[in-house]
Amino acid sequence: MTSTIKVDTISENTSANGVSIDGLTIKDGGITATTGTIVFNEAGADLDFRVESNGQANMFAVDGGLNVASIGGAVDTNATLLIHTTITDDNAGLTIKGAGSGTGARLAIADAGSNLGNRAETLEIGYDNSTDFIFSRTGQPLIIGVDSSEQLRIGSNLATGAEAAPDVASGGLCLQLNANDNQVLTFKSSDIAHGITGEAETDTFARFGKAENDKGGLYIRVMAEDNPNERLVFNVNGEGNITTTKSASGKGAVEFGINNKNGTGVTSVNSDANLLTINNHTSVQFIFDAEGTFHSNVGTATYDEYDDAHLVRAMDLSTSTKGLIASKFDEFIQYNHEDLAAAKIVGREEDGTPNSMVNWTAMSQLHNGAIWQQYEKTQRLTQAMYKLATKTIGKEEADKLLDEEEIKLLN
């Protein structure tokens, strides 16, 4: 037969045997009771309950009005259970131990409807029959999830998106996007408001994602606010001298490699393939191809108002830093560094001073113009010599002379 014992008030009893109430015995040695239910303050009165230890007046306390239980200190918050502790090497504050060696221990925090799994030596938090947080020291990773969907896994490395086999070394990071097509990684700063919200949130200054939704590739987009310079910076540092070999096997401090799939490996790309393009928005301006040639989308610059050969020589005179051999014709050069800058063959500093930054596209066009100008002058000279020959030796002999020297006149 079982019984229910209800205790609302127990007065101090000085007898050696203590107080005995229907199977509940309270005495110096503790409390003993037969089977049944022991109820304190069933009437629900605003009464506090307190148990003292040798050195703590509130080793266990219940505040009847606040509905709070406190361990190791007075009730001072509306938490359901409050634990006061001083963490030391020997005091963890709250410890749950297995009953014996190898039995493990488990702390589960869940709502009333949850049915969390049974794992030894585990801290498990779940809601609505799902497991959202698991930590186990028995060789299992720490898993954090939302609505029973794993989001973060921490083991010897870090993985997201329920990636159970991250292909990174110990201490590495694996980001699993699954079949999603949005960004896999974003960088934000609260002091940025670039306003380019068609590309990203206004405080996002960089984002990484798939280049093609179902194909892969890497897409990097950078956003900057009111910044005319350095929107994307590569700064490579290292120790020692950099390789100076100029060959097809030479290496650089920065290397871009483009490959094609070859079985499970990679190989060279197809002939004439465009390796790298540089765009102005969506318009391609520069192309570097697989044969090492460089293409530029520029309007044709002409220098008809200049003597192109003089401009070319002015370039050498203005920018050469190594033993330029002087020519007796240099004194006739009519251009200088300012003329080169005006023709946009060299650049200018912010204050307008010409510098030695060469526009090689303009130089190529200048060389073409100089060659053509010299060709025209040669043709005029040839025609003048032919006219002189016809007057001195006659047309027949002059024509023979052209044939012998394989010279053709432009008509």
Image (cartoon, rainbow, N blue to C red):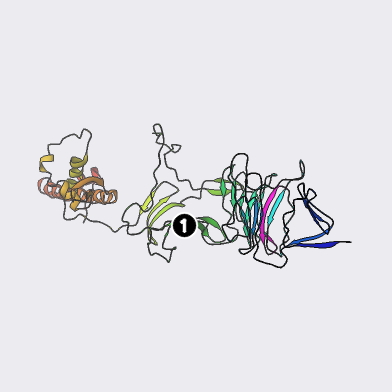
Do we see residue 398 in this rendering? no
Nearest to the observer: residue 406 or residue 188: 188
Q: Nearer the viewer, residue 230 or 407?
A: 230
Farthest right residue? 1
Q: Residue 173, relative to residue 90: is it above or below?
A: below
In the picture, measured across the screen, residue 392 lies left or right of residue 146, that is left
- Please say whether residue 209 is one of the residues in the magenta stretch: no
Q: Is residue 14 above or below residue 214?
A: above
**Residue lying at 77% horizontally and 45% vertically, measured from the top left:** 99
Which image quadrant: the N terminus? bottom right
Please tell me how crowded label 1 is: few (under 14), some (14-19), or many (20+) other residues with Cα within 10 Å: some
The verdict on residue 124 being magenta is yes
187 and 397: which is toward the camera: 187
Q: Is residue 175 left or right of residue 104?
A: left
The x, y position of residue 50, in whole percent, is: 66, 55
User: Residue at (41%, 39%) from the top-left corner?
Assistant: 253
Using the image, determine if residue 223 lies above or below residue 251: below
Span colored in magenta = 120-130
* Residue 273 percent coordinates (x, y): 47, 52
Q: Is residue 138 above or below residue 205?
A: above
Is most of the magenta stretch helix, strand or loop?
strand
The location of residue 25, given as percent across then percent down, is: 80, 53
Amino acid of disc 1? Arg
Q: Is residue 358 something that shows in the picture?
A: yes
Q: Which residue is mark 1?
A: 207
Residue lying at the far bottom of the rendered structure:
43
